[in-house]
Amino acid sequence: MTPPKESETSNERVARMLDQNTEEYPDDARSECIPPLPMAQIFSKTHVQTLQKLCSDIIVRGIVNYQRIKEALNKSTPGRHLLNAFTQFQLINRVKYERRQLPYKY
């Protein structure tokens, strides 16, 4: 790949960008397509069932926010375990995901 000149035309710029000089930059040849990383399973099946049971009213209707989730989960020991094991962001997103799955479950 050659550095740009003081003034270059758009055709020259495109040609320079498309120049795949793998001898000069060998790492570029291998990085054409990077496969997606495998998705981590954050919530176990038991965690999901507990969250569905304790937050069922939040999943079905109303505003999804951390205050409501926290109140619902604080009512039981398994719920408090979820509060300690997961971040606010993770819990809110899981409840939102469960809400999106409602049409497919029934």
Image (spheres, helix red, strand yellow):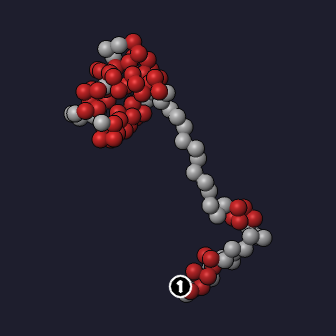
The answer to whether residue 51 is seen in the rendering is yes
Q: Which residue is mark 1?
A: 10
Identify the residue at the far left of this view.
62
Type of residue at label 1? Answer: Ser
Q: Is residue 67 visible?
A: no
In this rendering, would 9 be left or right of 102?
right
Residue occupying the point 42% across, 22% down: 82
Horizontal side of residue 22 vs 18, given as left or right: right
Report x, y in % for residue 62. 21, 33
| Image coordinates for residue 104, horizontal then vertical, percent | 33, 41
| Quarter containing the N terminus | bottom right
Residue depicted at 54% across the width and 42% down the height: 39
Q: Quadrant of residue 101?
A: top left
Going 41% across and 16% down the picture, which residue do you hit? 78
Horizontal placement of 40 versus 103: left or right? right
Camera-side residue: 36 or 5?
Answer: 36
Quadrant hosting residue 105:
top left
The residue lying toward the viewer, choosing from 38 and 71, is 38
- Residue occupying image coordinates x 33% and y 16%: 74
Lateral position of residue 20 relative to residue 8, left or right: right
- Up the image or down, 11 lies above or below 96; here it is below
Q: Position of residue 93 (x, y in %)?
A: 38, 37
**Residue 7 drawn at (x, y percent):** 57, 85
